[in-house]
Image (cartoon, grey):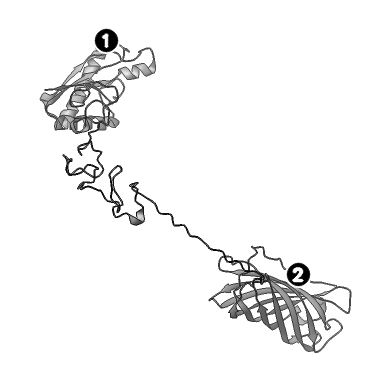
């Protein structure tokens, strides 16, 4: 005998009850899939259902009463019948997932058939089901459910199986379900002390809630309201009566008389306000303007040629800008090579390269009288010509700077 055995899978979720109202009423419509041995035409039929659920936060399982009615069921024999089922279930509602609320149920019921036959008779059944509710509003949801029923069969030793799928609406009403706490003989009232943490952002000793001057400089004496105790117009920590520089910019560090302390960013011994070359390499000898006397220009040439590679343009542009800005300076462009090849050829190549750099500086606006060119070939090496790295360092262009 062909049997239909369907067991719905329970949905996994967390263990918090989602429903807030005491009651839920769900009118449903659906279709009953019956196993083939029950003699039902097409092995299925339409049905309607009404479910009533009772919620309480005192328990995670809500009782439910269901009524399922199939008003017209056709048998293969040509007769018809009416099926009436009543069920009592425990419903477990899971946490809301995305826009859906899953649930699972388990229970028992009874089926009454107005026209029994030898294959399908009245009896008790066990059921298990699962589904989801999709809320439209706080009280109204769409409900989709699948319910498996196994009825104790009188005509054989195996249960008769039915699977019902239903769609409907759920309306929640009544008071909101609230958790009930057990009564206690003695009620203890606890006093909750709230500690308010109040900071002191400017570290002047006055809390923010009482500070009328929240950005007082560190070290400035303040009054009870967190404001300077003596008049300090530029808020540099030096009172106006002693301040020789009364309009110091807000972020400047000042000395004891309120004047900006000059800095030397490149540590070349020349303060920033007098340093026209503020990015000198540490350790280089500089003049009183903070500029190095000899600078290596990072210029690359094509192999065995005076042709300058495109990546050398920034170095040439920067040096041209300096000479056009500070016309009281002159520069001698000196070219060097490594010791590969003859001294005569190296000296000519170094002169050609120095001349090419000078010409590019003049093209960028430098006065021709400010710049000269000299090629010294392989003289004055700064690294070992016996290594590839050393020879690369010796092939260089230096600029000797002179203040007129």
Residue drawn at point x = 70 percent, y = 66 percent: 10
What secondary structure is marked by label 1? Answer: helix
Residue drawn at point x = 20 percent, y = 24 percent: 356
Q: What crowding class fits label 2: few (fewer than 14 Cα within 10 Å), some (14-19), or many (20 or more)?
A: some
Compute the Cα span from label 1 to label 2. Answer: 99 Å
Which residue carries the number 2 mark?
A: 6
Of the numbered discs in the image, which one, if any, rests on residue 343? 1
Residue 372 horizontal/vertical position (percent): 15, 21
Q: Quadrant of the C terminus?
A: top left
Q: Quadrant of residue 371?
A: top left
What secondary structure is marked by label 2? Answer: loop
Which of the two residues, 257 or 283, is positioned nearer the viewer here? 257
Up-down: is 194 above or below 76?
above
Residue 382 horizontal/vertical position (percent): 31, 15
- Count of marks placed on residues: 2
Of the numbered discs in the image, which one, if any, rests on residue 353? none
Q: Quadrant of residue 168?
A: bottom right
Residue drawn at point x = 29 percent, y = 22 percent: 283
Residue 67 horizontal/vertical position (percent): 71, 83
**In terms of sequence position, does the residue under pointer 1 or pointer 2 come before the other?**
2
Residue drawn at point x = 30 percent, y = 42 percent: 219
Q: Quadrant of the N terminus?
A: bottom right
């Amino acid at each position: 005998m062909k049997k239909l055995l369907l067991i719905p899978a329970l949905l996994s979720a967390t263990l918090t009850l989602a429903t807030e109202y005491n009651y839920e009423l769900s009118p449903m419509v659906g279709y009953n899939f019956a196993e083939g041995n029950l003699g039902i035409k097409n092995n299925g039929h339409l049905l309607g259902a009404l479910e009533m659920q009772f919620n309480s936060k005192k328990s995670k399982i809500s009782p439910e009463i269901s009524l399922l009615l199939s008003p017209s069921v056709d048998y293969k024999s040509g007769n018809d019948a009416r099926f009436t089922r009543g069920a009592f279930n425990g419903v477990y509602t899971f946490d809301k997932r995305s826009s859906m609320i899953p649930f699972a149920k388990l229970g028992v019921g009874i089926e009454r058939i107005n026209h029994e036959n030898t294959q399908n008779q009245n009896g008790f059944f066990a059921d298990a089901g699962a589904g989801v509710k999709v809320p439209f509003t706080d009280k109204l949801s769409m409900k989709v459910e699948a319910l498996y029923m196994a009825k104790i069969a009188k005509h054989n030793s195996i249960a008769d199986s039915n699977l019902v799928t239903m769609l409907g609406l759920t309306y929640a009403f009544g008071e909101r379900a609230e958790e009930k706490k057990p009564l206690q003989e003695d009620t203890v009232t606890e006093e909750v002390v709230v500690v308010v943490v109040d900071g002191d952002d400017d570290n002047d000793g006055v809390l923010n809630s009482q500070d009328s001057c929240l950005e007082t400089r560190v070290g400035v004496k303040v009054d009870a309201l967190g404001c300077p105790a003596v008049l300090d117009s530029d808020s540099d920590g030096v009172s106006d009566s002693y301040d020789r520089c009364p309009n110091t910019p807000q972020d400047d560090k000042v000395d004891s008389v309120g004047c900006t302390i000059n800095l030397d960013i490149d540590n070349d011994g020349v303060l920033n306000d007098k340093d026209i070359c503020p990015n000198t390499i540490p350790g280089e000898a500089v003049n009183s303007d903070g500029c190095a006397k000899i600078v290596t220009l990072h210029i690359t040439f094509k192999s065995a040629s005076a042709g300058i590679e495109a990546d050398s343009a920034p170095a040439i542009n920067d040096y041209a800008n300096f000479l056009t800005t500070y016309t009281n300076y002159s520069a001698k462009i000196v070219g060097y090579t490594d010791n590969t090849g003859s001294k005569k050829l190296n000296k000519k190549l170094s002169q050609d390269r120095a001349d090419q750099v000078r010409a590019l500086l003049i093209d960028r606006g430098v006065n021709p009288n400010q710049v000269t060119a000299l090629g010294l070939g392989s003289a004055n090496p700064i690294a070992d010509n016996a290594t590839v790295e050393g020879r690369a360092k010796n092939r260089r262009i230096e600029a000797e700077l002179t203040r007129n």
